[in-house]
Amino acid sequence: MNTPLVSLVEAGKTYGQLDVLSSMTMSLNEGEVLGLFGHNGAGKTTMMKLILGVISPSKGRVTVMGMAPDSKEAWHCRSKVGYLPENVSFYEQLTGLEVLTYFVKLKGFSNKDCKRKAIDLLEQVGITYAMKRQVKTYSKGMRQRLGLAQAFIGEPKLLLLDEPTVGLDPIATRDFYKTVDQLKSNGSSVILCSHVLPGVEQHIDRAMILSSGKLLAMGTLSELRAQAALPVVIKPISFKKGGLNDAVAQDAKLKHFVSGSCQNTLMVPEQEKLAVLKQLLSLEELDDVHVESANLEQVYQHFLEKYERNFQQKIQGGQYS
């Protein structure tokens, strides 16, 4: 059995009486992309800082590449880790090339290779045209691209990205995810934290949903859909007016899944999907069918609302005062 690249076992972080991260257990394997999702204050950035070794856990254990990331022994592993914070800031008076060359040197590259490596990275994120301009002249999106270039130095074994697509236009966002896919195919592991859920799901292997420092759910999107028991939306289509609606209304099985008064939309449990599709395909009136499983955003919303309902019930039951 492979040893996880990152492991948290009952790890928690407390500041005074405030529990910002509670008994978190998770693992990340080599070549895996984990999406980390939650509202502001959910504990995402705290978890990333624990993995980076910037802060130490108040309880439990954190290991990265086989050792505690906050230990002195972990210093040589840090060159294999890339990090993009949520709010990137650089020396305003330096040019983009000077900033990146400086970071390349910090990662241990030889002086003769630093400038060439920096230019290659700037080309990768699409801002070579501005590499000789001072950072103070950069837009928010350009600064974000420079931050991504810094995070990609040395093709890191572990990459932690906190809101990486903030400020990026659609083309830059697409190019960013291409780079993530490439790093994954080369064996890098990625923890990707984002509020922008549309477009993320096809690039992650598993999702981890946090709220108020607690783990609400973790798994593949298929596993989370199953846990949430969200229905599949099936929309049969016919070019003949009314014919399909009548056929659905006369079929007891199909009629059971009709969404309210809208007969061209069926809300079907995942385990019933194939049976319902077979039933629809037997109808002469059917010209096409549209099938839509719950997306990441809907799954996320489900677990968040479930947590909030349980929390309110506990308050009303007097468990919190």
Image: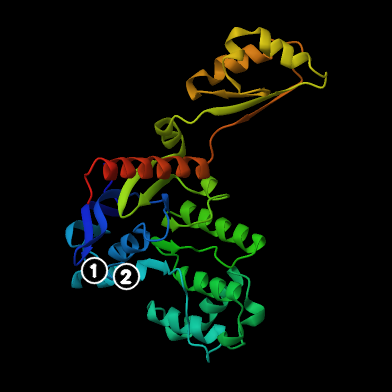
Amino acid beneath label 1? Ala
State the count of labels: 2
The residue that mark 1 highlights is: 74
Residue 39 in picture, x, y percent from top left:
42, 56
Give neighbour class at mark 2: few <14, some 14-19, many 20+ (Cα, 10 Å).
some
Q: Is residue 66 visible?
A: no
Residue 230 in picture, x, y percent from top left:
48, 31
Residue nearer the viewer, 100 or 275? 275
- Asked if 256 appears above or below 219 in the picture, the reply is above
| In the image, farthest residue toward the bottom | 93
Which quadrant holds residue 226?
top left
Q: Is residue 48 visible?
A: yes
Q: CA distance from mark 1 to mark 2?
A: 7 Å
- Identified at 66% across, 61% down, the residue is 171
Amino acid beneath label 2? Arg
Residue 132 in picture, x, y percent from top left:
61, 87
Which quadrant holds residue 104?
bottom left
Relative horizontal placement of residue 82, taking residue 296 as reference (left or right): left
| In the image, farthest residue toward the left | 59
**Callout 1 touching callout 2 (CB < 8 Å):** yes
Identify the secondary structure beneath mark 2.
helix
- Identified at 31% across, 44% down, the residue is 311
Relative horizontal placement of residue 44, taking residue 318 as reference (left or right): right
Quadrant the N terminus occupies: top left
Q: Which mark is residue 78?
A: 2
- Identified at 57% across, 87% down, the residue is 136
Residue nearer the viewer, 161 or 41? 41
Which quadrant holds residue 120?
bottom right
Give neighbour class at mark 1: few <14, some 14-19, many 20+ (Cα, 10 Å).
some
